[in-house]
Image (cartoon, helix red, strand yellow):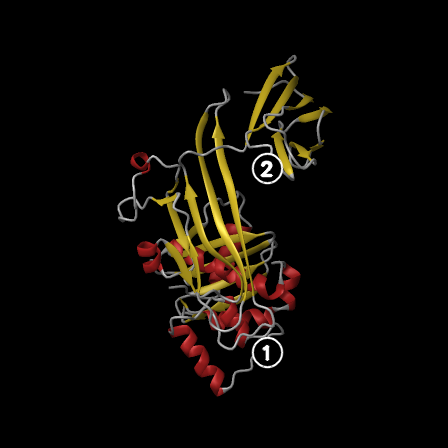
């Protein structure tokens, strides 16, 4: 499994170093710094092999995290574990930065000792870890608490500790959806899918069991797993076909398949209950139509038409359209009829923000943009 875990700053200085196996030496720290961080050309691959040693690395802001191993391990599992470690750190001291890591290095070493044992991932649940490792990095485990953490790690409800009490029981549920769309220059939709997730905030006492029913309009398409309950074409009813979904470990999958409901004992606080994806019968909320016209060899005029496809009773808030510009753009002239537009040279893009609260159905919002380059266009 994982032989060592290292954390570097942008200069290649080691902030955190923990070796779990004898086959990983201190020279691995320098090998990663020289061949990846200080490499002449940017290393795009997240996995780098150096002298029969594999380095799995991710970067957050100016911080590098590298997991080192000499064994043939599951790369997806290693990256999943590293992302979990980052989530745990963020839950303890917020943003991942060099200053925060230096100020909390004692806490980080305590977390790594709990999370990894001889290179094998153990418990990465934030709720359980916070019970036994305080925010100040002080461990306070009595014999009773040590027996309790053993039961939580090996038991069926390891994501929630016992004895939680609230004066007021509350439960909040948010459904967040992201529409991913790829269109051709002629306006034809090449690919489109909706990725959604259900986020919950649980402030409930004891060990409550929650149960949510799923609307009959939702049909699971398991692609060979036998979860499809009916054929949407035969039923004649308007349905939403979900291609795949992923649940939190607290969900009882057997009840979901048989009763078509989500039954679970929620963790304490905020967590992600499920993720899902659908690719069929997607109604796009907006349609962006760009009209491009070249005015000479160094100038171009772009007119952007934004249309809404939803009903007048719905609202569209904080709408932002980002229009990329060539790298050698020297000047931009904006004529914005609705909202606010600004050219950001650092991002090589024009950001158009629609600050009003709603769109009338099929309302056209126009913006004319003229920008010039310091040299002729290049193909």
The answer to whether residue 312 is visible is yes
Q: Is residue 48 left or right of residue 332?
A: left
Q: Nearer the viewer, mark 2 or mark 1?
A: 2
Q: Quadrant of the C terminus?
A: top right
Residue found 41% across the figure and 73% down from its top: 153
Q: CA distance from mark 2 to mark 1?
A: 50 Å
Query: Alpha-carbon neighbours of circle 2 within 10 Å: few (<14), some, or many (≥20)?
Result: few
Residue found 45% across the figure and 46% down from its top: 45
Q: Quadrant of residue 74?
A: bottom left
- First reached walking from the N terminus: tag 2 or tag 1: 1
Q: Which residue is mark 1?
A: 138
Residue found 45% across the figure and 65% down from its top: 4
Considering the numbered disc 1 on the image, is that residue within a helix, a strand or a loop?
Answer: loop
Q: Is residue 227 left or right of residue 139?
A: left
**Residue 77: percent from left, percent from top:** 39, 57
**Residue 233: percent from left, percent from top:** 31, 34
Q: Is residue 177 above or below residue 132?
A: above
The answer to whether residue 373 is visible is no
Q: Residue furthest bottom?
A: 143
Task: Pick the residue in front: 358 or 270.
Answer: 358
Q: Is residue 334 above or below residue 320?
A: above
Query: Alpha-carbon neighbours of circle 1 within 10 Å: few (<14), some, or many (≥20)?
Result: few
Q: Quadrant of the N terminus?
A: bottom left
Q: Which residue is mark 2?
A: 314
Considering the numbered disc 2 on the image, is that residue within a helix, a strand or a loop?
Answer: loop
Residue found 31% across the figure and 37% down from its top: 235
């Amino acid at each position: 499994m994982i032989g060592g875990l290292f954390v570097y700053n942008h200069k290649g200085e080691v902030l955190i170093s923990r070796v779990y196996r004898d086959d990983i030496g201190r020279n691995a720290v320098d090998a990663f710094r020289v061949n990846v961080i200080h490499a002449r050309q940017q290393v795009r691959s997240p996995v780098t092999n150096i002298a029969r040693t594999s380095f799995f690395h991710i970067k957050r802001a100016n911080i590098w995290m590298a997991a080192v191993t000499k064994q043939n391990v599951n790369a997806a599992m290693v990256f999943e574990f590293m992302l979990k470690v980052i989530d745990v750190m963020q839950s303890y001291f917020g943003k991942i930065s060099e200053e925060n890591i230096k100020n909390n290095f004692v806490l980080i070493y305590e977390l790594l000792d709990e999370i990894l044992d001889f290179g094998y991932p153990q418990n990465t649940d934030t709720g359980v870890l916070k019970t036994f490792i305080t925010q100040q990095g002080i461990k306070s485990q009595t014999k009773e608490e040590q027996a309790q953490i053993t039961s939580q790690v090996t038991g069926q409800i390891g994501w929630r500790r016992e004895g939680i009490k609230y004066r007021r029981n509350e439960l909040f549920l948010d459904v967040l959806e992201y529409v991913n769309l790829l269109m051709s220059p002629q306006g034809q939709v090449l690919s489109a899918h909706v990725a959604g997730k259900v986020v919950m905030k649980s402030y409930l006492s004891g060990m409550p069991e929650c149960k949510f029913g799923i609307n009959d309009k939702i049909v699971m398409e398991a692609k060979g797993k036998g979860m499809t309950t009916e054929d949407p074409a035969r039923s004649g009813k308007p349905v939403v076909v979900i291609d795949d979904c992923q649940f939190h470990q607290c969900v009882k999958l057997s009840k979901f398949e048989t009763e078509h409901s989500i039954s679970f004992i929620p963790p304490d606080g905020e967590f992600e209950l499920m993720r899902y994806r659908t690719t069929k019968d997607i109604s796009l909320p907006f349609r962006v139509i760009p009209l491009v016209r070249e005015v000479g060899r160094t100038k171009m005029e772009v007119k952007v038409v934004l249309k809404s496809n939803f009903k007048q009773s719905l609202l569209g808030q904080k709408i932002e359209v980002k229009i990329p510009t060539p790298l050698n753009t020297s000047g931009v002239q904006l004529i914005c009829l609705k909202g606010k537009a600004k050219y950001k040279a650092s991002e090589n893009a024009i950001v158009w923000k629609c600050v009003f609260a709603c769109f009338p159905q099929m309302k056209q919002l126009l913006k004319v943009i003229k920008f010039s380059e310091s040299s002729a266009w290049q193909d």
